[in-house]
Image (cartoon, rainbow, N blue to C red):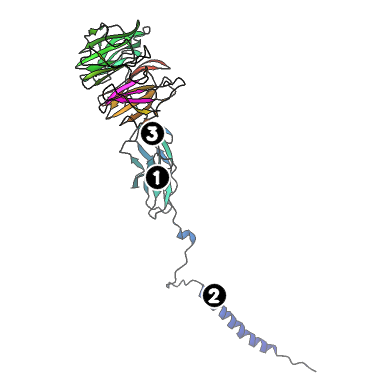
Amino acid sequence: MSKFRIPSFLIKSFLIPVIIVVYACSSSENEESLPDNSGGDTESPTTPEEEQNMPPNAFNLIEVANDSESVELSPNFEWEFATDPENEAITYSFFLDTSENPTTQLATNLSDTSYNLEAELELGTTYYWQVEASDASGNTTISAIFSFTTKPIGSFVAQPDFGFRHHAAVTELNGRLYMLGGFGTVNGAPQHYLDDVWSSDDGEVWTLEADNPGFIARALHPLVAFNDKMFLIGGFRANGPSNDIWSSTDGKNWVMETANAEFPEDWGHKMLHFNDKLWLITGGSNNESNRSVWNSENGVNWTRVVEDIGFSLNLDLEAVVFNNRMWVIVNDEIHSSDNGIDWTLELEDAPFADLGTSGFSLKEYSLVVHNGKMVLMVSRQDTSESADIWSSSNGKDWILEHTQTAFPNREDNSFISFGGKIYIMLGFNDQGFLGDIWTLD
């Protein structure tokens, strides 16, 4: 039986239209998915690169350089210009404080790559600074952090012609500083006790007032201004302790008021001008049991106020008048009195004390009243260390103001407030006798 076959021309005629229809449908779908390039309203898609606005490029700090020391108190800061990938305008914010990650913003929207600090920074303090660059889109780039330390407290004044010495006495009379005596050397001469008297109206230029004033050369002696005179009282001489009293109105001419005052021979005692009288607190240097307090209405005739002050005294005691009271600092204790008889223990275990096994201070105290506060320098002979500066507005609570000083560490110096400044003069350290003069800024 023969099979029926579809003629080939019919198959071709049937398939061709089908293929055409399928192709047309496929082309129509593809055309719908393609973008319209005819200028219609259809938006073209964006790429990730086109969406992201880049922050400013990295930049470097220039000045103040990292780890700088002895920087002035109002420094100028500089940094590199930060470029932006999209060429947007750049502004800067400036950060500065004493934290290792500074957060205190001192300026913002700066267009310049520098900032001049108008206010003064603290002396001897470490600061950290950083700059943030911002573009118009709000993107930011932060710089590295630089640190620097400001100059330490202390300004050199002079190295006068009066040689090198320690345990000299200094006071102010009628707007002039007077420096007298001590132990040391002048013009290369052998070490000896000194009796010369010098004066200055600025602490820098000094005039020799007397090189042979009449009294025996000495050290560890108080010199105090009272009733328009200077009084030189006792001290240690080549032949031992003394209790003689001399006075002068000009530093040139000296009068012996008495060869033997009522109080015992001693050295290292302290003199105070309080309630229109001179007060003497014995140093206990000649006799440890000597802990008496004396006063005088004229600087010549003396009355014992109390035989035993009630606490230990020694060569390192310091005394001032502050807030209508007399104050004594010795070892790790602070005492005060408003009458010289009754003394109050204001503070024990003082924060600045550094006592040895003997109970005596391993460091020396120098004390003045300045700008309404007591200012205390705690120092020693070791020049590898720096003196500490403390202050108190009430005598009980003490603040450590500075731990770095520009002047060399020392003991046996003269320490006085004069002309709105505190003067540190002369002294002794592990390098020998000193003849320099500095001020605390």
Q: Look at label 1 and name its amino acid.
A: Thr
Q: Which residue is mark 1?
A: 103
Badge 2 or badge 1: first in the primary sequence: 2
The residue depicted at 31 percent of the width and 22 percent of the height is 319
Q: Which residue is mark 3?
A: 125
Give the image location of residue 433, x and y in percent.
Answer: 38, 14
Q: Quadrant of the C terminus?
A: top left
In this view, the residue in front, 305 or 71, is 305
Give the magenta part as a residue range. 317-341
Mark 3 residue element: loop
User: How far, Cα to Cα, is label 2 from label 3?
Assistant: 74 Å
Q: Which residue is mark 2?
A: 30
Q: What mark, if any, has residue 134 been given in the picture?
A: none
Mark 1 residue element: loop
Crowding at mark 2 (Cα within 10 Å: few <14, some 14-19, many 20+) = few
Crowding at mark 3 (Cα within 10 Å: few <14, some 14-19, many 20+) = many
Crowding at mark 1 (Cα within 10 Å: few <14, some 14-19, many 20+) = some
Examine the rendering and report whether any part of residue 406 can be seen: no
Residues tagged 1 and 3 counted as in contact (Cβ below 8 A): no
In this view, the residue in front, 436 or 244, is 244
Q: In this picture, is 106 found above or below 290?
A: below
User: How far, Cα to Cα, is label 1 from label 3?
Assistant: 17 Å
Badge 1 or badge 3: first in the primary sequence: 1
Left or right of residue 168, residue 226 in this image = left
- What secondary structure predominates along the stretch shown in magenta? strand
Q: Look at label 3 and name its amino acid.
A: Thr
